[in-house]
Image: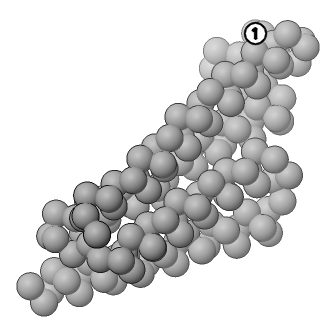
Amino acid sequence: MTHSLIFVPVAMQIALTLWLYIVLASAKSKAIKRGEVKEERRALHDDAWPDSVLQINNSIRNQFEVPVLFYILIGVIWSIGAVNTYIYIAAWVFVISRFIHAAVHTGSNYVPLRRNVFMLGCFVLIGLLVFMVYKLATS
């Protein structure tokens, strides 16, 4: 396995974030056309938008929280030459969990399911962190 392949799931996570921006732009455009936006509050206040837009916006905001830790961990693991099949699989599990999380967040927004998927991603990050610390401590 080529170690640089670890950046494929990273690219997919970035693509998810960018895709959500496209979805947000479309949702905002539709909300404006339907007259669902409080124009006087639109520039500075989230409450100007309908819930359907806020769900997408919140999902985007979420892509700049836990995934940032993923980017750092993958970068460090790659830089110390510690990428292996398990790390590659863990990276994909994390990214797939983020895709599912975003789908739930922007769809049904069923919080118990969203939380469980979120926690799966967090547990993967904890595993990556433990692995990284171990590799750094034993090298």
Residue 72 placement, left or right of 57: left
Q: Position of residue 107 (x, y in %)?
A: 81, 47
Q: Residue at x 31, y 65 (%)?
A: 73
Q: Which residue is mark 1?
A: 40
- Dot 1: element: loop
Q: Residue at x 50, y 41 (%)?
A: 15
Q: Which part of the image, by quadrant, shows the C terminus?
A: bottom left
In the image, residue 113 sits, relative to residue 20, either above or below, namely below
Q: Residue furthest left?
A: 139
Please state the total of marks drawn on the protein image.
1
Displayed quadrant of residue 81: bottom left
In the image, residue 126 sits, relative to residue 24, either above or below, namely below
Q: Residue furthest bottom?
A: 138
Q: What kind of colouring is applied to the model shown?
A: one colour
Q: Amino acid at mark 1?
A: Glu
Is residue 64 visible to the viewer in this orientation of the structure?
no
Displayed quadrant of residue 85: bottom left
Dot 1: within a 10 Å radius of its alpha carbon, few (fewer than 14), some, or many (20 or more) residues?
few
Residue 65 placement, left or right of 110: left
Near-viewer residue (43 or 124): 124
